[in-house]
Image: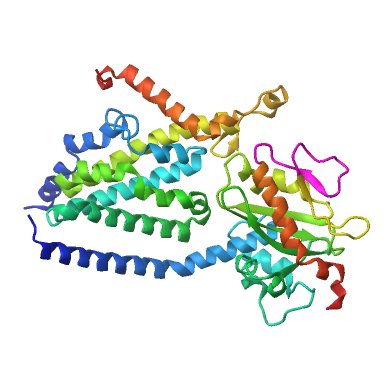
């Protein structure tokens, strides 16, 4: 077999229509937060500002992708009676590694995220994807599924964080965007936006808009 | 269905493999993390004398400005043989006041004046708060402060780590006209402009503000004897 053929043979299944779908679906029709309703807890906690939301999204994506990959590679050896324990060990180990890496290389970000990185372990998306997908599929599609779900989760997180940071502190990614003249004229930041209830309401509004555009998602 | 033996061996192997992997990661990254913690401490100390640093230039600026460090005890006597930089305030505060080792960092500022920097540590609403406060050589007038926190409410109590809050402390005094230790109060509803011993609290962050006030008082009280008679050394 020539090298060209080899490459083609490898490339073909790598980004087949099925795999692309795994990446795209979690962004909208199978979004982990708004449709599967997983990972709500951290969506409330880290969406006060854009920066922690982005780093959290990135960390979750990395951990989901690699835990999916590892569990999927091991799926035929894992005894079904202790599979949840095995999944937890893999997730916990990966989260600790991510936490240690953040502390060593991006210390200031890790200070902001300190508590939340530990919370990745309890993020329902991880266990949800492992049980629903990685345990029954091959490593590569599982890896892509993990990335897709991580990005889908991150998308909602960043959207919520945008509104909360903008209305709550008048900032965008840490930079003040609402001009001083507005404050002088009597405008005040909405303190409620900073508190968790508004995250829930913001997510609710996003779900509302999404369902009104995709009628198929509405339950009967 | 897997046998019990398989399950036991599987879990044992898994635990060992994961433990080894985590140990390697932790040991490999420890030196880098320690450097980060050290640099952060240097940045915090420099921030309390109003010097803005980045993680890159912190070490260089620290050696440039920080010329001397001291460790004293509650009576104001010098303790020798202890490196002030390595004193862990969290541990010291757990000891009875008489046994505490209290570090002082002395910086020489650009205008040639000395600034005496004292570390602080206390409790906020949700967790630990800490910081540094620096004084002019009268051991009374505040040069600057730096506060940080573990988990205060973002937008409310967490505002203590902003410049806007910290700059109110500049020029305040901790002793009154008669030389009695009064510390600095953080006042809900705002301090009067001519109040030398009070600053505005953060609206919505009352418990954190009170925590900062208590932290300053509790940590400074140990230095009172040294501050009143620094030449004894």
Residue A128 appears in which quarter of the rendering? top left
Q: Residue at x 8, y 61 (%)?
A: B3
Q: Residue furthest front?
A: B96
Specify the color scheme.
rainbow
Residue A116: x, y in percent? 44, 48
Task: Work out whether A32 lies above or below B213.
Answer: above
Q: Is residue A137 visible?
A: no
Query: In the rendered image, which quarter contains the C terminus of chain B?
Result: bottom right
Q: Main secondary structure of the magenta part?
A: loop
Query: In the rendered image, which quarter contains the N terminus of chain B?
Result: bottom left
Residue B111: x, y in percent? 83, 60
Tell me how many marks there are: 0
Q: Which residues are magenta?
A: B187-205
Looking at the image, which is closer to me, B53 or B192? B192
Q: Is residue B195 magenta?
A: yes
Looking at the image, which is closer to me, B233 or B100? B100
Residue B100: x, y in percent? 69, 72
Left or right, B130 with respect to B233, comes to left
Looking at the image, which is closer to me, A201 or A17? A201
Residue B37 appears in which quarter of the rendering? bottom right
Residue B53 appears in which quarter of the rendering? bottom right
Left or right, A17 with respect to B26, comes to left
Q: Is residue B16 visible?
A: yes
Left or right, B215 with respect to A158, comes to right
Q: Is residue B200 magenta?
A: yes
Q: Residue furthest right?
A: B178
Q: Residue at x 72, y 81 (%)?
A: B80
Q: Residue at x 71, y 45 (%)?
A: B165
Residue A219: x, y in percent? 26, 20
């Amino acid at each position: 077999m020539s090298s060209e053929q080899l490459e083609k043979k490898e490339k073909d299944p790598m980004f087949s229509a099925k795999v692309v779908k795994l990446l795209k679906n979690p962004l909208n029709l199978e979004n982990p937060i708004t449709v599967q309703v997983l990972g709500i807890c951290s969506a409330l906690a880290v969406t006060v500002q854009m920066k922690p939301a982005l780093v959290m999204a990135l960390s979750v994506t990395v951990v989901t992708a690699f835990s999916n990959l590892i569990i999927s590679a091991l799926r035929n050896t894992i005894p079904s009676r202790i599979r949840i324990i095995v999944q937890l060990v893999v997730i916990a180990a990966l989260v600790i590694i991510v936490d240690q890496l953040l502390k060593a290389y991006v210390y200031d970000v890790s200070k902001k995220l300190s508590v939340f990185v530990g919370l990745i372990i309890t993020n329902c998306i991880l266990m949800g994807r492992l049980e629903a997908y990685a345990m029954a599929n091959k490593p590569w599609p599982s890896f892509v599924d993990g990335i897709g779900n991580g990005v889908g989760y991150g998308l909602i997180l960043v959207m919520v964080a945008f509104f909360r940071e903008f209305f709550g502190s008048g900032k965008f990614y840490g930079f003040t965007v609402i001009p001083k003249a507005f404050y002088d004229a009597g405008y005040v930041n909405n303190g409620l936006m900073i508190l968790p209830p508004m995250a829930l309401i913001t997510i609710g509004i996003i779900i509302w808009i999404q369902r009104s555009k995709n009628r198929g998602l509405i339950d009967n | 269905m897997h046998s019990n033996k398989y399950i036991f061996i599987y879990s044992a192997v898994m635990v060992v493999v994961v433990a080894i992997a985590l140990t390697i990661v932790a040991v490999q990254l420890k030196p880098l993390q320690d450097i980060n913690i050290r640099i952060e401490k240097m940045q915090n100390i420099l921030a309390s004398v109003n010097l803005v640093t980045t993680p890159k230039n912190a070490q260089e600026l620290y050696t440039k400005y920080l010329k001397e460090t001291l460790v004293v005890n509650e009576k104001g006597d010098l303790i020798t043989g202890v490196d002030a930089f390595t004193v862990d305030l969290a541990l010291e505060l757990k000891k009875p006041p008489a046994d505490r080792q209290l570090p002082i960092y002395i910086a020489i500022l650009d205008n040639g004046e000395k600034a005496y920097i004292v570390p602080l540590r206390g409790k906020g609403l949700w967790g630990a708060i800490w910081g540094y406060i620096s004084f002019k050589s009268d051991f009374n007038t505040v040069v600057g402060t730096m506060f940080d926190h573990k988990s205060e409410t973002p937008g409310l109590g967490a505002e203590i780590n902003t410049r806007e809050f910290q700059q109110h402390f500049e020029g305040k005094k901790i002793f009154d006209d008669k030389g009695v230790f009064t510390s600095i109060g953080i006042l809900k509803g705002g301090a009067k402009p001519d109040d030398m011993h009070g600053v505005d609290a953060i609206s919505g962050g009352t418990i954190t503000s009170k925590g900062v006030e208590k932290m300053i008082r509790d940590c400074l009280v140990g230095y009172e004897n040294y501050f009143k008679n620094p030449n004894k050394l």
